[in-house]
Amino acid sequence: MNITFKPLQRDHLLLLLCWLEKPHVKAWWDPDIQWTMELVWEKYGSYVEGYKLEGGIEKPMAAYIACLDEIPVAYIQLYNAHDYPREDGASLDDLPESLAAIDIFMGEEAYVGKGYDSAIMRQFLEEFVDPKFEACFVDPDQDNTQAIRAYEKAGFMGGKTHGDSIWMIRANNDRRNE
């Protein structure tokens, strides 16, 4: 199995629309939004350019389509966790200053629950996160046990519960090997 990451391109937006409306994705990723191409473009169009507007400021946002043997199967995004306030208003101040955050979903249902998600995350963390950040943060819904297990298999450790989510951290490889 060969895992590759393709930077999000405009021609991926139709694929995102398809994935965002699949029940297994919609259950955890923007479930209240009825996605259209216009809404996908509005939210993800700037990600193609490498940023997200936050309070009128362009903040770095790296978005990728993860492929298994050249088959697009997942969406993953990477950003500085401190650039984006948490939805519940919780502070990240007690977490490392050099802190990445990722969000991921398996778009292709045939690949869900087979360990591909944690393999994709491990490789993504090694290639894109570890060289630049001290640690990585995720905050899955505490009821999303499948995602939590995948994050644990990728090296994340559970921590505080905030509202409906659980905060999980993974130190980069250099830190874990010290």
Image: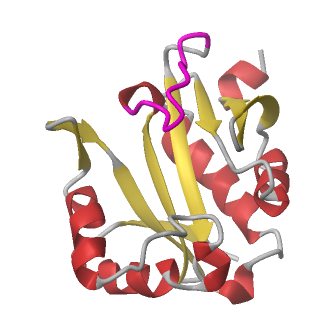
Whether residue 9 sits left or right of residue 119 in the image: it is: left
Q: Is residue 25 magenta?
A: no
Work out which quarter of the rendered image holds the N terminus and state it: bottom right
Image coordinates of residue 51 in percent, x first then y, are 24, 47
Q: Is residue 50 above or below residue 92?
A: below
Q: Is residue 44 above or below residue 56?
A: below
The span picked out in magenta is 84-94
Nearer to the camera, 45 or 135: 45
Q: Which residue is pictured at 28% across the width and 62% down the height?
A: 43
Magenta part, dominant SS: loop
Question: Looking at the image, which is closer to me, 107 or 134?
Answer: 107
Decide if residue 82 is on the left or right side of residue 42. right
Horizontal side, residue 48 vs residue 117: left or right = left
Residue located farthest toward the top when viewing the structure as drawn: 94
What's the residue at 33%, 46% (across, down)? 61
Expressed as whole percent of the image width and height from the top left, the position of residue 126 reads 61, 43
Q: Position of residue 68 (x, y in %)?
A: 61, 78
In the displayed structure image, the side of residue 91 where residue 56 appears, left or right: left
Of 139 and 126, nearer the camera is 139
Q: Which quarter of the figure has residue 27? A: bottom right
Which corner quadrant holds the C terminus?
A: top right
The answer to whether 155 is drawn above or below residue 145 in the figure is: above
Residue 121, given in percent of the width and then of the height, sits at 65, 54
Q: Please report the residue visible at 82 percent of the width from the left and 62 percent of the height from the top.
A: 146
